[in-house]
Amino acid sequence: MGKFANEIKAYALKNAIEFGKVDAGRILPKLFQHGLEKNEVKSVMPEIVEIVGDVNRISKTEREKLFGDFKKFIKEKEEKERGLPELPNAVEGKVVLRLAPYPSGAMHIGNARTYMLNAMYAEKYKGKLLLVMDDTIGSAEKQIAEESYQLIEDAFAWLGVTHYGDIIYKSDRLEIYYEYAEKLIQKDKAYVCHCVQEQLRNNRVNGMACGCRMLPKNIQMLRWKEMFKMKEGHATLRIKTDMLHPNPAFRDRVLFKISDRAHPRVGNKYRVWPTLEMNWAIDDHLLGVTHIVRGNDLMIESDMEKYIWDIFGWKYPELMHVGLVQFEGIKLSKSKSQQEVISGAYVGWHDPRTWSLQSLGFRGIKPEAIIEFIKEVGFSKQDITVPIDNLYAINRKMIDNESNRYSFIVNPMKLSLKGVPDWKTISVPLHPDRKEAREISVGDIYISKVDYEKYKQQEIRLIHLCNVNLKVGQVTSVENKNINKITWVSKYVLAKVFMPDGEWINGFADEGIESLEVGQVIQFERFGFVRLDAIKEEEGKKIYEFWFAHK
């Protein structure tokens, strides 16, 4: 028995009790707070897998009984991390936080985590929550998508976040940013730079100021006015910092740039646009934001905001940085998703490959599961990677009892059998833990070719029906024997399932799905949870289209 065996057993039992089943990937991160070193991960994983398998095989009653013996091995920190750490210097009713989405596409699950932390804090302290569309012009690689505004609003509404009042748009506030740009110039803290990129890069690396910086502020003001008439890329407004600052990226950063790209809301009304740190330094002060919760990827922007606040003598809001969340085997990228949506490679922003909140809803993931998942991840200051199965486990627990069971088979083939009882219909449970049942017709039997090839030399059980020796095509008995089980259908309807990788899987579903309503989530036994998205006609035949949620 390894040195972490008790801890593994404790967390495995705890998760199995909470979610019905536990995955090995959920246990490993917990062990680091018990002293696990990175070089020990490879050796401890087999033991995790073995213990998790044992826990998954025992009953709910046994788990609860065993957990009483192992609960002591769970650190108290485990429970505390699920909550929100206190905001520094927070006064109930006086806290002001902000949601700051950049509308380049639908919010994905990674974005949602940081936004929801802000919303949760606002609720916790009975504070004010602002929704500020951070829609400055952005870059050519990451452009604003006009449909994003509504997608973002819809996503927040889906998550239950509607208490932010009127939406504030950065694109309506350009004149305010210009006013403060001129104040920085008048304070001799900003200058207009005409230097080419390569020269600027060399200057920053070598800690050298360019000639543009040396010009007096009255000349800088004239150059600022001229900047509005100059060609794109020919000038920027830069802030004056210490050219020997330890971080070269902090030296004389850009505050404004020229862009001739049309903006979805204001068209070509403006050509000179502020950077993130410039507009937020001004707005966090003017909007009265008291606490900023943002990702670790914006550390340097936070430092630059502080620098600007110092110039104006403004009080700092409290800054809290949260680690970014990544998912094992999944790359979240709004830029890539935007390209694929525009090209038609994705069916839209609700395509499962975008990992947008819309896509998760289409798959049958509940908003409550997203919120619970965010709470479970907690407020970690370190970047973390978690299995997407953690979200699925939470959702599974929420939808399992309400999701009726039906049959679906891929690559169907007709099974010729001897000794079939004279069934007309049989009663099949809608759910293994409920008493309700439904009647289904029994005639010709269809199974998956994959199942047939796998078990063709064996006796198997057609689930809910009978036992069959596939080698001789003979019904052997009807008792529920402890042998391999496979799914079957008799009277069928055509169905297809849209998978998370963007592929369609076609097959036969049993007649029971004809009673479903669009939007309903069910479980195809031994396949997974699915949501009925549409009922269509293809080549004169009715076909039921589902989206796959998870196992």
Image: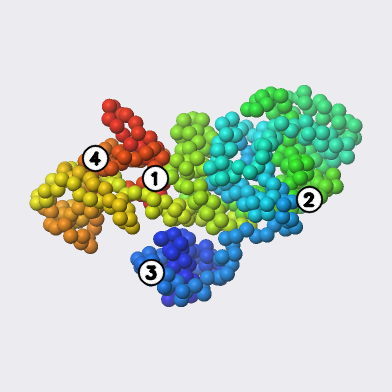
Image position, residue 540 (x, y; %): 27, 27
Q: Eyeballing the image, is 196 above or below 297? A: above
Q: Are marks 4 and 1 in contact (CB under 8 Å)?
A: no
Q: Residues within 10 Å of mark 2 (few under 14, many from 20)?
A: some
- Marks 3,2: beta carbons within 8 A: no
**Mark 2 vs mark 4, CA separation in Å:** 65 Å
The residue lying toward the viewer, choosing from 5 and 266, is 266
Q: Quadrant of residue 35?
A: bottom right
Front-most of 503 and 129? Answer: 129
Q: Earlier in the sequence, mark 3 or mark 2?
A: 3
Instruction: Please tell me whether residue 109 is drawn above or below residue 435 in the rendered image.
Output: above
Mark toward the viewer: 1 or 2: 1
Q: Is residue 24 left or right of residue 29?
A: left
Q: Is residue 441 left or right of residue 61?
A: left
Between residue 124 and residue 52, name the one nearer to us: 124
- Residue at 56% across, 41% down: 157
Drawn side of residue 291 relative to residue 113, left or right = right
Residue to which mark 2 is pinned: 316
> How many residues crowd around disc 3 within 10 Å: few (fewer than 14), some, or many (20 or more)?
few
Q: Secondary structure at mark 2?
A: loop
What number is the disc on residue 521?
A: 1
Residue at image location 49% in from the left, 30% down from the top: 343
Ranked by sequence position, the earlier of labels 2 and 4 is 2
Asked if the residues shown at circle 3 and circle 4 are in contact, with their CB atoms under 8 angstroms apart, the answer is no
Q: Which residue carries the number 4 mark? A: 492
Q: Position of residue 171 (x, y in %)?
A: 70, 32
1 or 2: tag closer to the N-terminus: 2
Going from the N terminus, do you reach mark 3 or mark 4 first? 3
Residue type at numbered disc 4: Tyr
Image quadrant holding the N terminus, namely bottom left
Amino acid, disc 3: Thr
CA distance for labels 3 and 2: 53 Å
